[in-house]
Every structure is written in structure tokens, then in C-alpha cells.
Amino acid sequence: MSKRWGSGTVVIPAPREVDELMKSVPEGKLTTINEIRAALARKHKATIGCPITVGIFAWVAANAAEESRQKGERMITPYWRTLKTGGVINEKYPGGAESQKSLLEKEGHKAIRKGRNYIVVDHQKALVGI
């Protein structure tokens, strides 16, 4: 759904759209919430993807994926590959930043602590176009 917003339009995506984009990130690659927002805006011919709903739907997808993983399912949404702006690991995803850091390091990424956050080193080099 698109709504007028200032001089542009904002797309409020379906939760499934956010999940599908998160699932499209291959092992060893990364994306950010802002990349997902931009992809949704392009898809819907809007100016911007709603930051609130995209963030909420990414969190929902991450938690649903973790529930599935705990049930033994192997084909889950790789939520740990979706970072915040600047390569920051999302501490609100399941297991917190430490858990995601471990998952990312298994895929060859390096994360360092910067203040309260973990940041993926050279994350820009691993960004995938979605």
C-alpha cells in the first residue's frame, strides 16, 4: 500500500515482502534495513519504504525464523544477514548481537565492538543488491 507523504509516497509493505527480501540474501552476503526499504520503494514505485513497518516486519521475520530453527527446520530466513545502517548488528533480533555475531563469523564476516554495538567490518563490500 502506498500513501502520500510530503512531496513523495511511502510504501507500507506486506510482512511477507520484507521476509522474501531477507531470504534473498545469500550466504556470505549482507543487506541493510535501508536497502530493503529502497528495494520496496522501487517495487511499488514509491519514494521510500516505511521505516517503522519495515523494521517491525524484519523483527517479526527474524523471530519466526528462530522459532522454526529451534523446531529443527533448516530452511529459515537468514535474519542475521540484515544489518542496521552502518553495518550495525541488530541487537533486537533473536539471541541479541552476540548470537548474530557468531552466525556472521561462521559465514566469514568479522564483527567488532564499537561502543555498545557490534559492527561488521567492511560490510559495504558484502552488500548484495536486492
Image (cartoon, rainbow, N blue to C red):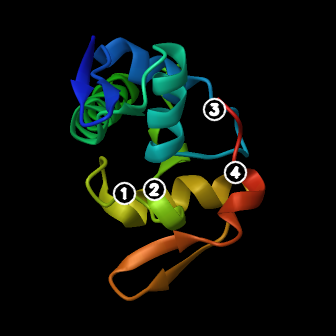
Lower position in the chain sequence, tag 2 or tag 1: 1
Is the residue marked by circle 4 packed among few (<14), some (14-19), or many (20+) residues within 10 Å? few
Lower position in the chain sequence, tag 2 or tag 4: 2
For the residues labelled 2 and 1, say whether their Cβ atoms are less than 8 Å apart: yes
Is the residue marked by circle 3 packed among few (<14), some (14-19), or many (20+) residues within 10 Å? many
Give SS at disc 1.
loop
Q: Which residue is mark 4?
A: 107
Query: Horizontal placement of 63 versus 80: left or right?
Result: left
Q: Which residue is mark 3?
A: 25
| x and y, in percent, of residue 32 in the image | 51, 47
The residue at the point 29 percent across, 34 percent down is 50
Lower position in the chain sequence, tag 2 or tag 3: 3
The correct choice, above or below, for 85 with respect to 53 in the image is: below
Q: Which residue is mark 1?
A: 90
Three-letter residue code for mark 1: Asn
Is the residue marked by circle 1 packed among few (<14), some (14-19), or many (20+) residues within 10 Å? many
Q: Which mark is residue 100?
A: 2
C-alpha separation, residue under disc 4 versus residue under disc 3: 12 Å
C-alpha separation, residue under disc 1 versus residue under disc 3: 16 Å
Lower position in the chain sequence, tag 4 or tag 1: 1
Lower position in the chain sequence, tag 1 or tag 3: 3
Give SS at disc 3.
loop
Three-letter residue code for mark 4: Glu
Which is more foreground, mark 4 or mark 3? Answer: 3
Query: Horizontal placement of 120 versus 127: left or right?
Result: left
| x and y, in percent, of residue 19 in the image | 42, 22
C-alpha separation, residue under disc 2 versus residue under disc 4: 11 Å
Which is more foreground, mark 2 or mark 1? Answer: 1
Query: Horizontal placement of 106 versus 40: left or right?
Result: right
Quarter assignment of residue 129: top right
